Amino acid sequence: MGHCSITSSKTVLVFLNLIFWAAAGILCYVGAYVFITYDDYDHFFEDVYTLIPAVTIIAVGGLLFIIGLIGCCATIRESRYGLAAFVVLLLLVFVTEVAVVVFGYIYRSKVEDEVNHSIQKVYNEYNGTNTDAPSRAIDYVQRQLHCCGIHNYSDWRNTRWFNESRNNSIPVSCCKPNVSNCTGSLAHPGDLYPEGCEALVVKKLKEIIMYVIWAALTFAAIQVFGMLCAFVVLCRRSRDPAYELLMTGGTYA
């Protein structure tokens, strides 16, 4: 009965190690996605420390791959020290993922203030050229999020670019995609996106951080299960004489 329990725990543990390898890939993907998306929105959110959870989650992904390899070898070879190292590493990763969740929630709460602080500055720097980074960022956001201006399209009236152009038009990135021959003229407000970008940028950045938080929470729960299975194998191995004899090929006297 004890041997069956150990064998079952070992099977689950090997399966979990395969999950850890899959998790490593997923976590690295999530981290890379955050980096790429942050690059599109970094003009609206200047605090680079927001990338700490993403950097950590990529590092955890790489470490999980190594842990999965150690766990598989230790389980198959019945190495007590290997399993102990496996548990310790899982515990360290678990603590790291808890830290990612905490940092994620901290930075998520700062998103709105950061965007509110920087978005007006970015819009004032707009000059309408594709070579200008703030201009590219604004045009990208307005097209991707289907928004215009900070609160609505009328905010463009207060920008330096609008006052210098003097043609009563705003960037064509504010034009709805289903409207043909849209020039961004304020004389045709129905052609323009009615919603401002500030609230949508805040929402998008919060969603990105939540991806990291949920990924960390999900795999932290799986790691707890992995640690429990490893503990079962370790404890049964040290307490069950029959199991020790079975693994060493010995017999009772």
Image: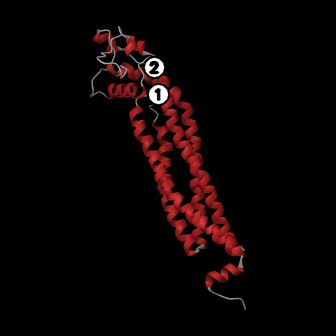
Asked whether, in this view, residue 28 is left or right of residue 98, the answer is: left
Q: Secondary structure at mark 1?
A: helix
Alpha carbon of mark 1 to alpha carbon of mark 2: how far? 9 Å
Of marks 1 and 2, which one's residue comes earlier in the chain? 2
Q: Return the mark for residue 245.
A: none
Quadrant into which the C terminus falls: bottom right
Residue at point 56%, 43% (across, down) = 214
> Which residue carries the number 2 mark?
196
Q: Position of residue 235 (x, y in %)?
A: 69, 70
Q: Position of residue 50 (x, y in %)?
A: 49, 38
Residue 116 appears in view: no
> Dot 2 surroundings within 10 Å: few (below 14), some, or many (20 or more)?
many
The amino acid on which the numbered mark 2 sits, given as a three-letter code, is Gly
Q: Is residue 143 above or below residue 91?
A: above
> Which residue carries the number 1 mark?
201
Labels in figure, total: 2
| Image coloring type | secondary structure
The amino acid on which the numbered mark 1 sits, given as a three-letter code, is Val
Name which quarter of the figure residue 153 lies in.
top left
Q: Position of residue 152 (x, y in %)?
A: 45, 16
Residue at point 64%, 63% (across, down) = 229
> Dot 1 surroundings within 10 Å: few (below 14), some, or many (20 or more)?
many
Q: Secondary structure at mark 2?
A: loop
Q: Is residue 93 above or below residue 133?
A: below
Q: Are the residues flagged by discs 1 and 2 in contact, CB closer than 8 Å?
A: no
Name which quarter of the figure residue 118 lies in.
top left
